[in-house]
Amino acid sequence: MNHPSDILTADALSRRHFLKKGSTAMVGGALLGTLAAERFAHAASTDELKIALIGCGGRGSGAAEQALNTSNLGPVKLVAAADVHEDRLKGALNNLKAKHAGRVDVPEDRQFVGFDGYEKAIACADVVILATPPGFRPAMFEAAVKAGKHVFMEKPVASDAAGVRQVLAAAEEAKKKNLKVGVGLQRHHSNGYIETVKRIQDGQIGDVTSARAFWNGSRPWQKKRSALEQQYGRKLTEMEYQLRNWYYFTWLCGDHIAEQHIHNLDVINWVKNAYPVKARAMGGREITNSPDDGEIYDHFACQFEYADGSIMFSECRQQPGCWSSVSEHVVGTKGRANVGRHEITGADAWRYKGGGKDAYQQEHDALFAAIRDNKDFNEAVNGAMSTMTAILGRMAAYSGKEIEWQAALNSKIELVPKELGWDKPAPVSPGADGYYPRAIPGRTAVL
Ligand SMILES: NC(=O)c1ccc[n+]([C@@H]2O[C@H](COP(=O)([O-])OP(=O)(O)OC[C@H]3O[C@@H](n4cnc5c(N)ncnc54)[C@H](O)[C@@H]3O)[C@@H](O)[C@H]2O)c1
């Protein structure tokens, strides 16, 4: 078998390439009273699906709720939870119990706190929700697939190219094991997006010549070291601080081009049915300048080039008081589309008028229906490729160089440490002034 990274040459960057490669082999993965994946080929809607939540923060809690809301398709129960922080784990479980009393059964002995808790939670479940910061996703996804579990994992699926390669390899393994994998790029489950993308792909705006993607807004939450130390009444180890304030560290979050802007980049990849072959970019920090801003940039402006020569112009910015937009736009030879507004202008104008469920719920409905009906469902490859698109843009901006897809994907730089623990060294450290080193275009190496 080819290693997935071997087949991702520039001329093979077509989504169809992956979709063609269906899987047939089925390997059971029953562990600790959970259902073997192969049973679902003949599963009754009465089979109870046991769910484990790994990463019990805001999105993990939301995803667990959406998974439990699929009870109309068959019984579901949250049976295990894991988090590095006990307070997050308890808080999420209390909220979930209040909303889904009969469907949350996570006694103390299935609450796993610590860096290795995920392995124990995976062992308890049929379906695993991965919603930690993305830096941990590749190892957790690999472990879930190894254990034969279905997965819902949040985007982005990695923070570096090594992680993307790991996810691609595990995705292939998941296909062989007939495991179903959902990825939190929920626009793929929004009826309005689906209809608009289909119309573009069917030629309603002619040939696509360029596209624009934006996530311009302000900074999200931030956990200041001083406030954390006051809250806990002690000094935090560097690792603990970075995990609490994970958004601001590239090894954990991938920078905001990956953390947020991936949604918009992914939509254009979807429209193009392809992934970029290279990127040029600018970026830096203009207004964020405190040690708690960690190492990430506050703006990126990228040009992604596809194999057919068309360009996606992308901007993401975290600067309050500026023009803001979270949107995707496509220009064709016969018209234009505002994809997020589900609108086409030009000779054949159209606007989506249908309704549709919340896409966050629909993505879970689709995953759980696929598990129960044994339908092909594996979003991991696209999740990895769109994550890589964002990482490619980040590499181009950090280095100031034009970067080719294949070189980026083969990058030897691994951001996530192999050894994790509260007293283990964090991969980046502040200088004597408290500031973290940041990427300097023209000087920073990314390959
Ligand atoms: N699809 C979407 O629209 C969407 C929206 C929000 C967040 N997300 C994604 O969800 C993920 C989580 O974001 P969030 O907003 O919930 O963050 P969060 O900080 O609220 O939650 C993350 C949780 O993971 C825990 N954690 C950290 N490291 C861990 C480890 N090694 N093992 C176990 N637990 C660990 C943290 O303690 C925390 O409870 C991110 O990848 C984010 O991009 C997606």
Image (cartoon, grey):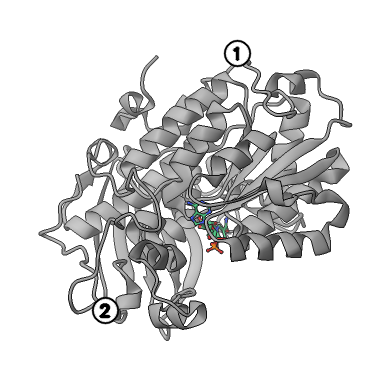
- Name the residue that disc number 2 marks: 286
User: How many discs appear?
Assistant: 2
Residue at screen point 43% across, 69% down? 245
The answer as to whether callout 2 falls within 8 Å of ligand 1 is: no
In the displayed orientation, state which residue is furthest to the left.
Answer: 443
Mark closest to the chain's N terminus, 1 or 2: 1
CB contact under 8 Å: marks 1 and 2: no
Q: Is residue 436 visible?
A: yes
Residue at screen point 33% across, 48% down? 416
> Which residue is at the front of the view, 272 or 176?
176
Please tell me the numbered disc located at residue 343. none
- Name the residue that disc number 1 marks: 25
Q: Amino acid at mark 1?
A: Ala
x, y percent for residue 326? 50, 67
Quarter of the image where one finds residue 290: bottom left
Residue at screen point 60% across, 13% down? 25
Q: Amino acid at mark 2?
A: Glu
> Which residue is at the front of the view, 340 or 43?
43
- In this rendering, position of residue 444 left or right of residue 90: left
